[in-house]
Image (tube, grey):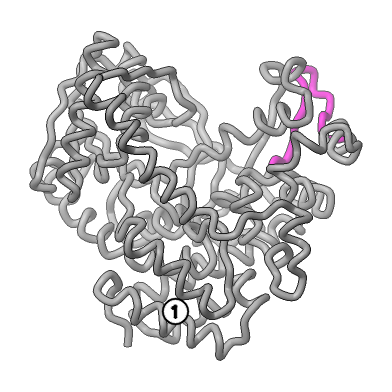
């Protein structure tokens, strides 16, 4: 059994997924095939995985490849973890150019002007992946972990023949972190049931009950408003505010959610940043921190071989086990809607419960979301679908329309200013983007 990692220089993420597979005895022996255009990071990942495999008596055989097609040949599972353009220059461009136009962001990888342009430079690479996959491993399952999740996964599922699923971990951590913040972990962490559905990074905690079916939402909302947990809630004020205004808690963190809505980052209301503890330019700050910390981490993981692993919340190993052994496994994954959520567009990429077995991944019918939640999802789906359309048409007017409809961008800038910003980003990104007419 062969697992391919595209973007294998994402060393810590590779460790989590491969470590989980090593910790899953049902998977048995498997090859890990690593590919990255950064050969130094590729070799570091290989050395780290060798340490990991040896320490835990793993049955993995680890190879690196400089030829992508050879790496993909006869793959069973492909994990996509690439970042086209990296921090320098592309993430820097995604933030610096909008900043000059008066548009501020927090993360810029999923929606907003940053998410749009991140998608447009990634989609051509995914097309090239799809060509190779259909030639050398047409039956492989493509596990996409790359943002913007809904745009990239939706494109692969609609416009390529590659068997694709989009995976994130925001659903897995949503309820545990909410319960912990509100002092409910001890009683309910392993004693509750919940349903989550919507779109990636904006899926909704539709229900939360104890094992007897008693609704826990009233107590969650009471504690959230009580002031007793204000200090622990400080990192998550946007989501709690949304919950009280729209009725439901959203999966993705407040630092992300702040830029998916038009309510929180507003030049006219700078006091909102302090009120909701919103850190602007957060993703570039995290990137610089990770770059600075990598030397120390590399010395530990690669040079000294001090690799520790505990089972992560990532779905990959569970999916692989389920398909190999025909053991049913429940996940939340990103798939084309096709009526799964009845009040969202049929061609949208939605995040819904899915069941996995040897025959594949089977999305579950959700029905209609509460109308206010569907309405909020629509504002993000508009941008996702039009970004895909812009990539397919290569027309600037379609790109402008995607940006015009972005909730945060349109709340801050006029349409003429948005158009000028898009033109400046096209010029600044240069060869990283396809040519637009």
Q: Nearer the viewer, residue 256 or 127?
A: 256
Q: In the rendered view, does 268 fall on the left or right side of 115?
A: right
> Is residue 358 visible from the viewing direction of this image?
no
Q: Quadrant of residue 47?
A: top left
Q: Quadrant of residue 182?
A: top right
Image coordinates of residue 281 in percent, x first then y, are 54, 59
Q: How many marks?
A: 1
Does the magenta portion include 117?
A: no
Image coordinates of residue 374 in percent, x first then y, are 69, 58
Q: Nearer the viewer, residue 338 or 354?
A: 354
Tag 1: Cα neighbours inside 10 Å, few (<14), some, or many (≥20)?
A: many
Image coordinates of residue 402 in percent, x first then y, are 51, 75
Q: Nearer the viewer, residue 189 or 310?
A: 310
> Is residue 19 visible from the viewing direction of this image?
yes
Q: Measuring 51% from the left and 81% from the top, which residue is drawn there?
A: 401
Q: In the rendered view, does 204 fall on the left or right side of 418?
A: right
């Amino acid at each position: 059994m062969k697992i391919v990692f595209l973007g294998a220089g994402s060393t810590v993420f590779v460790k989590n997924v491969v470590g989980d597979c090593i910790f899953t005895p049902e998977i048995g022996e498997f090859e890990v095939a690593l590919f990255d255009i950064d050969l130094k990071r590729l070799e570091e990942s290989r050395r780290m995985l060798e340490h990991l495999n040896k320490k835990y008596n793993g049955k993995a055989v680890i190879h690196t490849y400089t030829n992508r097609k050879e790496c993909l040949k006869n793959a069973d599972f492909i994990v996509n973890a690439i970042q086209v353009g990296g921090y320098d220059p592309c993430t820097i461009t995604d933030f610096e150019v909008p900043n000059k136009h008066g548009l501020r962001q927090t993360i810029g990888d999923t929606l907003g002007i940053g998410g749009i342009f991140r998608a447009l430079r990634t989609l051509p690479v995914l097309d090239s992946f799809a060509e190779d996959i259909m030639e050398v491993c047409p039956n492989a399952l493509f596990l996409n972990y790359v943002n913007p999740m809904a745009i990239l996964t939706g494109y692969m599922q609609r416009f390529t023949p590659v068997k694709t699923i989009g995976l994130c971990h925001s659903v897995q951590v949503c309820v545990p972190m909410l319960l912990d913040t509100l002092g409910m972990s001890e009683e309910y962490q392993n004693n509750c049931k919940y349903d989550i559905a919507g779109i990636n990074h904006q899926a909704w905690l539709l229900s939360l009950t104890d094992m007897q079916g008693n609704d826990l939402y009233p107590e969650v909302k009471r504690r959230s408003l009580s002031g007793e947990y204000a200090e622990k809630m400080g990192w998550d004020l946007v989501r709690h505010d949304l919950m009280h205004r729209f009725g439901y808690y959203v999966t993705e963190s407040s630092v992300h959610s702040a830029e998916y809505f038009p309510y929180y980052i507003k030049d006219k209301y700078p006091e909102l940043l302090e009120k909701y503890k919103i850190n602007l330019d957060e993703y570039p700050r995290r990137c610089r921190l990770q770059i600075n910390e990598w030397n120390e981490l590399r010395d530990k993981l690669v040079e000294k071989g001090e690799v520790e692993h505990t089972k992560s919340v990532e779905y990959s190993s569970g999916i692989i086990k389920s398909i190999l052994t025909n053991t049913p496994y429940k996940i939340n994954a990103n798939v084309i809607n096709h009526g799964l959520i009845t009040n969202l567009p049929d061609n949208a990429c939605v995040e819904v419960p899915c069941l996995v077995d040897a025959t594949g991944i089977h999305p579950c019918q959700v029905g209609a979301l509460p109308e206010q939640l569907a309405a909020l999802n629509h504002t993000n789906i508009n941008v996702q679908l039009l970004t895909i359309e812009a990539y397919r048409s290569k027309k600037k007017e379609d790109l402008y329309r995607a940006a015009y409809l972005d909730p945060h961008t349109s709340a801050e800038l006029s349409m003429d200013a948005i158009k000028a910003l898009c033109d400046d980003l096209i010029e600044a990104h240069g060869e990283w983007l396809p040519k637009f007419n």
